[in-house]
Amino acid sequence: MKYLAILLNKLASFLLSLVHRGGSLPGQLALKVDANILKELKISCPIILVTGTNGKTSTSNLIASMFETAHKQVVTNRKGDNMRAGITTCLLKAASLTGVVPADYIVLEVDELNIPYIIKSLPVTALVVTNFFRDQLDRAREMEQLIQKVEEAIHDFDGTLILNANDPNVVRLKDAAVQADARYFAMERCEESKAVNKEASEGKFCPRCGGKLIYDFYQYSHIGEYHCENKDYETPATDVKGSVKSIRDRQFISKDMEFHAPQGGLYTMYNCMAVLCVADFFHIDMQYAAKTFETMDVPDGRNEEFNFNGQKCVLNLVKNPTGANEVMKVIEEDQDDKTVLLVLNDHAQDGTDVSWIYDTFFEKLVNEKTVHIICSGTRCYDMALRLKYAGYKERIEVEENLEKAVASLKNADTTMYAIATYTALQPVRKLLRRNEK
């Protein structure tokens, strides 16, 4: 059955490539033939899984590119097919017909809910966890329930955890994985750090005793430096730590080296710190990471830039309050006049529960520099209402037709921002790329 599953995956992948399509269908077919096909693969290299609510696509792509820059052969699901079928598609496509996966490293982005299956099916060397936030309540449910699923999956994991030391909900994974080693990365207090934080926050209580977590400072949301009031829990000592030199110029320092983040925002520097922690663990010269940060192509919809009539347009994916708040900060920092397109969909892949928009600080758009906001998507009227509640009194345009909404944005004579949920991202991107100049 193994050989048939691999052959079927390769054939389906080839046929899809003829029509310039990808996706997880080949893996779905392979799993129907052999549900345990991943366990039957012959893998002799390190396997690195990357998971978390935000940043896993960018982080896994950066890790893979760093290894490639260091002249290593890498197998990775760079397009972000991070569920069981997508990962199966990726690995079987790379495998020989006998199931051998030739690589120096395998780097896989994995959806949090798929960690239980993947970590039991592959000989995983390291699990990188970026952060945990509330996300897609209809699918992932509350964050605590999601974390418990991951904890159950790793209780007998004996590899290495590479964890964000500034997220107490990530650090707690080490308690669950008693056989695992742990490496930690973090960012030091910087100009954006705050003593008090009003953003959506899930890091309020100690995961060991339930006592209050006291923060020395917040970076964003519940990310920061903390300790339990009962002294049961605190930010662990870090293996790799960064310090911000300039948020605006994307510069930070770690291990006496200066780095330039590939995208704006403090959250991007956290992605880079995860990469540097992986480099440190696998003894990869950090010069390769530095070069990767400088040359890495930005994933679709992650501060992706376009140009229309001499004006910059920035496209961003949003899917939960924390990620959206970071995008709001980037827009707020821009002191030019701005036109903003907000596309809110509520399909299954977006999350059918859109209440998260009330946990996002759209109030940051309420200023004289935001001259025009366009709302589109299946829940465009909900988005417009949210802006009214935020106090935005300038021009709000509600356009159900996405093509017309994007055309309205492109006609602006200001800096432009397009913000889209998951299923809207590629349609918006396609329309932005049409006649770009």
Image (spheres, rainbow, N blue to C red):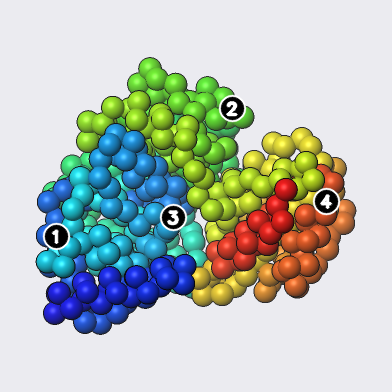
| Labels in figure, total | 4
- Asked whether the viewer can see residue 259, the reply is yes
Task: Measure the C-alpha gap from mark 1 to mark 3.
Answer: 31 Å
Judged left or right of residue 291, residue 161 is left
The residue where tag 3 is placed is 53
Contact between labelled residues 3 and 1, with CB atoms less than 8 Å apart: no
Residue 166 vertical placement versus 37 (above, below):
above
Residue farthest toward the right in the current orientation of the protein: 394
The residue where tag 1 is placed is 100
Q: Which mark is residue 249?
A: 2
Residue in front for this viewpoint, 127 or 207: 127
> For residue 16, what is the image quadrant?
bottom left
In this rendering, which labeled residue sits more in front, label 4 or label 3? 4
Judged left or right of residue 82, residue 177 is left
- Secondary element type, mark 4: loop
Give residue 284's position: percent from left, percent from top: 26, 31
Q: Amino acid at mark 3?
A: Thr
In this rendering, which labeled residue sits more in front, label 3 or label 2? 2
Contact between labelled residues 1 and 4, with CB atoms less than 8 Å apart: no
In this rendering, which labeled residue sits more in front, label 1 or label 2? 1
Give residue 437's position: percent from left, percent from top: 72, 48
For image coordinates 49% across by 61% down, the residue present is: 135
Q: Is tag 3's residue or tag 2's residue first in the polypeptide sequence?
A: 3
The residue where tag 4 is placed is 412
Give residue 33's position: percent from left, percent from top: 21, 82
